[in-house]
Amino acid sequence: MATLIKDKARADADRILDEFWSPSLFPVDPAQIALKMGLRVYQADLDPGTSGMILKLAGEPAEIYFASGESAQRQNFTCAHELGHFVERQYRERPDDEFEFVDRRNGAVNAHEFYANEFAGNLLMPADDMRSEVWFGASDADLARRYGVSQHAVRVRRMKLGIGS
């Protein structure tokens, strides 16, 4: 099951990049992509321990919120993660009219959270580009700057892709 979710998240992220972003432009700006897709994006004071959330009400555009007190790199990943929830729920045969996800640090991981994390990793750090950058000698710090994410996110992505450090 995890393999199918992982593959779907990658395919969806690739499609969103092709449709709403220039594939060679880094770092990817998930907030700009969300705006191009018709979502509303807000930086907000969220409850302690909450990184972000997405809310979709029937007949209204989806709204992404990410915590104002977190680093720009964390906000970038959180926004991409929330966008993943939107894509998972809306880009299918029968889209959901309403949904809500609240993402807390150290929260439970279910299939929806797994998809959103995989989507965010693929959107911000596309596999082929990362493999190429590593082949040309990019360090974790170089990759973090290129992709607008933390070095921790780079290490997790490298591990998932099986790219040695």
Image (spheres, helix red, strand yellow):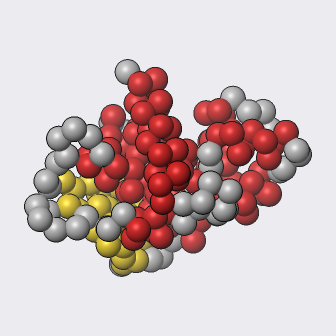
The percent position of residue 139, horizontal first and vertical second, equals 83, 50
Residue at image position (44%, 42%) is: 12
Residue at image position (80%, 38%) is: 165
Res 14 seen here: yes
Compared to residue 136, the image places residue 75 above or below, namely below
Residue at image position (77%, 51%) is: 140
The percent position of residue 117, horizontal first and vertical second, equals 46, 45
Q: Residue furthest front?
A: 19
The percent position of residue 70, horizontal first and vertical second, equals 51, 71
The percent position of residue 65, horizontal first and vertical second, equals 34, 69
Compared to residue 105, the image places residue 76 above or below, namely below
Compared to residue 107, the image places residue 83 above or below, namely below
Q: Residue furthest left?
A: 58
Q: Nearer the viewer, residue 95 or 51?
A: 95
Residue at image position (80%, 57%) is: 142
Q: Nearer the viewer, residue 109 or 43?
A: 43
Q: Is residue 130 left or right of residue 165?
A: left
Q: Quadrant of the N terminus?
A: top left
Res 108 seen here: no
Q: Is residue 85 left or right of residue 23?
A: left
Q: Is residue 136 left or right of residue 26?
A: right
Q: Residue furthest right?
A: 137
Q: Is residue 26 left or right of residue 71?
A: right
Instruction: Please identify the quarter of the rendering in which residue 61 is found.
Output: bottom left
Q: Nearer the viewer, residue 36 or 77?
A: 36
Q: How many marks?
A: 0
Compared to residue 112, the image places residue 69 above or below, namely below
